[in-house]
Image (tube, grey):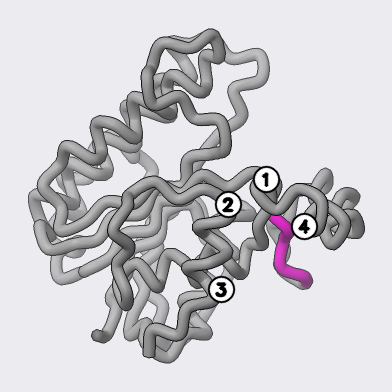
Amino acid sequence: MKIKAIVFGATGMVGEGVLHECLKHQDVDSILVINRRPCGVEHRKLTEIIHPDFFDFSSIESRLSGYNACFLCMGVSAFRMKEKDYRHVTYDLTMTVARTLVKLNPEMTFCYVSGTGTDSSEKGRSMWARVKGQTENDLMKLPFKAVYMFRPGYIQPIKGLKNTNKMYRVLSPFYPVWKTLFPGYVCSLEQLGLAMINTLKLPPDFHILENLDISKLSSIDAS
């Protein structure tokens, strides 16, 4: 299978890392990134669309068909945000993207980066976890070929990429210890990108992937 992927979030740490893995992978034929500002990456596989309004894709819909994967890696911190505002930039934005793409590419595999602790019941005390839970639940109701929820905890960055969060640079030396002591709460950005690619090569039977699932799926030889 040749993978033709759309990547959202390439100007952030996670999206940049996933894009990096896609560009390296022999089975990824082409990548379209949709950003509000340039990602600063040039590659023969890569096409970039600068689009300011992620709540309305009508002006570029004609350029979004013909893809069999979407890796949605956007996200904001809920710190000091009101639930209404966080829901708008998390749930509403994600569902706008997904509903647009499922209409154009019903045979697409859709991968969404959520997070460890997401609340599938939508009834817990944590605001961000409820919103993420509703987002996951409603994405899985859409008629894509497949939908996968990725729930990483701490993500070890890829050395040399420019969008690595400062906090992650500080914490990265501790990753080998955490990986040994708390393997269910950490994964690497390389593993996350490879696991997303492998959902098309060897689709898992389950649709919510925690850190151990991400690590396992990333190591499978799906050639």
What's the residue type where badge 2 is placed?
Asn
**First-in-chain label (4 vs 2):** 4
User: How far apart are the alpha carbons under marks 3 and 2?
Assistant: 20 Å
- Kindly identify which residue carries mark 2: 211
Q: Which residue is mark 3?
A: 20
Marks 3 and 2: which is nearer the front?
2
Q: Nearer the viewer, residue 55 or 86?
A: 86
Task: Determine the residue positioned at 27% across, 35% down.
Answer: 95
- The residue beneath circle 4 is 179
* Camera-side mark, 3 or 1: 1
Query: Residue flagged by tag 4: what amino acid is it?
Result: Lys
Helix, strand or loop at mark 2: helix
The CA span between labels 3 and 4 is 22 Å
**Is residue 196 one of those drawn in magenta?**
no
Labelled pair 3, 4 in contact (Cβ < 8 Å):
no
Q: Is residue 142 above or below residue 35?
A: above
Asked whether the beta carbons under mark 3 and mark 2 sit within 8 Å of each other, the answer is no
Q: Are marks 3 and 1 in contact (CB under 8 Å)?
A: no
Identify residue for label 1: 185
Dot 4: few (<14), some (14–19), or many (≥20) neighbours within 10 Å? some
Towards the viewer: 96 or 110: 110
What residue appears at the point 25 percent right and 38 percent down from the top-left corner?
A: 139
In the image, residue 102 above or below residue 135: below
Magenta stretch in the rendered image: 155-159
From the viewer's perspective, tell me whether residue 189 is left or right of residue 18: right
- The secondary structure that most of the magenta stretch takes on is loop
Are the residues flagged by discs 1 and 2 in contact, CB closer than 8 Å?
A: yes
Query: For numbered disc 1, what is the local secondary structure?
Result: helix
Residue 169 occupies quadrant:
bottom right
Label 1 – label 2 distance at C-alpha: 6 Å
